[in-house]
Image: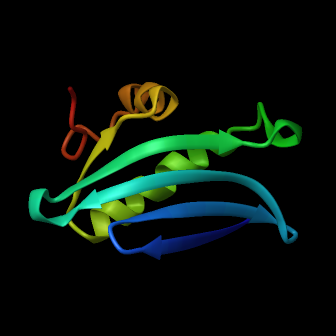
Amino acid sequence: MEYINDRSGNGGVLLLNKDEEEVGRLTYTIFPEENKLIISFVLVHAQFEGRGMGKYLVEEAIKFARENNWNVYPHCSYARSVMNRMKDVEDILLKA
């Protein structure tokens, strides 16, 4: 599996690829003045569903946020559900 962070300005896409085929993607927006990363959308292509790939994308976004000292607001309902079940994200998880 390979992650590609295609960042442009205050936003970007985390891509998850396997053997040069896109498995899924996570879109985000960064508000640096607020130290915040917002997860907007998580998509896993149908042939890869049910294997935890969406969770891997959320975990990679969390890792990216931690590297930059940002908090994470999961606007995407899937990302929110994943993060609410995680035990080690209370320090960066922003709730509405």
Residue 19 coordinates in the image, percent (x, y): 88, 69
Image: 40 above or below 36: above
Q: Position of residue 29 (x, y in %)?
A: 35, 56
Residue at image position (29%, 62%) is 66
Quadrant in which the N terminus appears: bottom right
Who's the residue at 15% across and 59% down the image? Answer: 35
Residue 55 appears left or right of 36:
right
Quarter of the image for residue 14 reads: bottom right
Q: Residue at x 37, y 34 (%)?
A: 75
Along the viewing direction, whichever of 65 and 31 lies nearer the viewer: 31
| In the displayed structure image, the side of residue 20 where residue 42 appears, left or right | left
Q: Can residue 39 be seen in the rendering of this structure?
A: yes
| Horizontal side of residue 72 vs 48, given as left or right | left
Q: Is residue 90 left or right of residue 16?
A: left
Q: Looking at the image, what colour scheme do you see?
A: rainbow
Q: Residue furthest front?
A: 9
Residue 76 x, y percent position in the rendering = 45, 33
Quarter of the rendering containing residue 84: top left
Q: Residue 33 appears at what percent x and percent y? A: 10, 64
- Does residue 88 appear in the picture of this structure? no
